[in-house]
Amino acid sequence: MTNSKLTAVSALSLAVAGLGASAQAEDLTLCWAAWDPANALVELSKEFEAQSGHSMNFEFIPWPNFADRMLNELNSGGNLCDLLIGDSQWIGGGAENGHYVKLNDFFDAEGISMGDFADATVYAYSTWPKGTPNYYALPAMGDANGWFYRKDWFEREDIRAAFKDATGRELAEPKTQKELLEIAQFFQEREIDGQTVYGAAIFTERGSEGITMGVTGALYPWGFKYENTPGSYDMEGAVNSPEAVEALEFYKEFYETATPPGYTNSYMGESLDAFKSGQVAMAMNWFAFFPGLYADPNTGGDKIDFFVNPPQNQAGSTLGGQGISVVAYSDKQDAALEYIKWFADPEVQQKWWDLGGYSAHNAVLESPTFKDSAPFAGDFLEAMGAVQDFWQEPAYAELLLAMQKRIHDYVVADQGTAKEALDKLIQDWTETFEDEGKL
């Protein structure tokens, strides 16, 4: 960030005592992905417009195109977005390439403390380098990969009896990854009410991030690590550890024995469709979708329930979610910072949760009423206590494409062994880090 930008931020921080202090009203554009939480944010932001006098415009991009569209916008120095809710993996590039305004001076002047937000979200969504108090975003949307299931099927006496005959135990929410697979295999090609159903919808998509976000749901509970020592880029023996190999073999077995036919390139939308159409007993997806799932008239309500990604050797959930940043190329940074200040308010954060967004503010998460505020609220808290994220390096896109290829080739295309796939992934990542001058 240039000195002139720092000066502007500092001046605003010292001068603005309230939301109505802007010299003139601005038209702000906030960019994000097109999904249910974005609709909730539009509704929430009406309060900001009324208080500040600014007008909010929104640019929401469908998830399959979101990364390409927004990263191209940032890399070209475009000024479409004044505010951007960007993926956690973008924070390194956003900081090092000067795309995001550093917010430390603003936070200090306005009394915004990162200690008021959940530690995992501050670390993942806001900081660069990792573990340092350098903030380029405010935690905006806490999220993790979780599970939902047909509670009405799990409670049927005929299904429960059949499951106990097959496994010797009661049908219930799985407590381990292996129990999860056992349940999915039990439902695979089972006939329920005259319809053939399948075990579970998992992520297998190759083009963007899908299969990586899915397979890490197994890798993390088995104890997967990207490096032997954080910050060392020493991957041999970590990425391809025996535990990682076993987890990858597990995910392949899951794909081959407990998913709908033709489920070779599926991600968020396909998971939702498979569940809502009654094809599967269980499905993985982001907590962000759970409010809409619960409200669904056909498969929601008392027909659905939720559980956190089960542990195996340890607890572990794949991190989702995003932070909100001020784009460095915006000529409306003062007004954009007003939005950040407003959004950080605990009362606004509570309304954000009430509308279907996932607040990361401790005042919301630690409220004694939070766990009972939604049927998935307690699971969300548990998940966020054990989340792990993909590489947040500036070269994350290249790192992600390598993992997408190696994992999809093994799991879906049935090429080679799990150990070979992970060995090749280390080679790919080593080459990238060498090109980046980090090895």
Image (cartoon, rainbow, N blue to C red):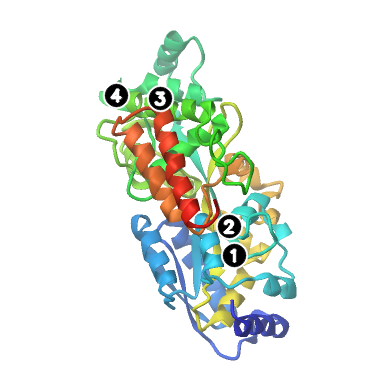
Give percent across and percent down for residue 438: 55, 54
CA–CA distance in space, label 4 to label 2 = 45 Å
Of 320 and 96, the residue lying toward us: 96
Q: Label 1 belongs to which residue?
A: 137
What residue appears at the point 70 percent right and 49 percent down from the top-left corner? 366
Q: Nearer the viewer, mark 4 or mark 1?
A: 1
Secondary element at image label 2: helix
Q: Position of residue 436 (x, y in %)?
A: 50, 57
Badge number at residue 184: 3
| Amino acid marked by disc 3 | Ala
Q: Nearer the viewer, mark 3 or mark 2?
A: 2
Q: How many residues crowd mark 3 within 10 Å: few (<14), some (14–19), many (20+)?
A: many
Name the quarter where the N terminus is drawn.
Answer: bottom right
Counting from the top left corner in percent of width and height, residue 386 is at 62, 40
Q: CA distance from mark 3 to mark 4?
A: 18 Å
Q: Residue at x 34, y 59 (%)?
A: 65
The amino acid pointed to by label 2 is Tyr
Residue type indicated by callout 1: Ala
Q: Residue furthest bottom?
A: 23
Give the labeled residue for mark 2: 125
Q: Residue 193 got which mark?
A: 4
**Distance between mark 4 and mark 1 Cα atoms:** 49 Å
Lower sequence index among marks 4 and 2: 2
In the picture, measured across the screen, residue 347 lies left or right of residue 323, that is: right
Tell me if label 1 and label 3 are in contact, CB under 8 Å.
Answer: no
Residue 149 placement: quadrant: top left
* Residue 379 drawn above or below residue 183: below
10 Å crowding of disc 4: few (<14), some (14-19), many (20+): few
List x then y, in percent, for residue 402. 39, 46
The answer to whether residue 283 is visible is: no
Q: Residue at x 50, y 52 (%)?
A: 433
State the separation of the CA atoms marked 1 and 3: 39 Å
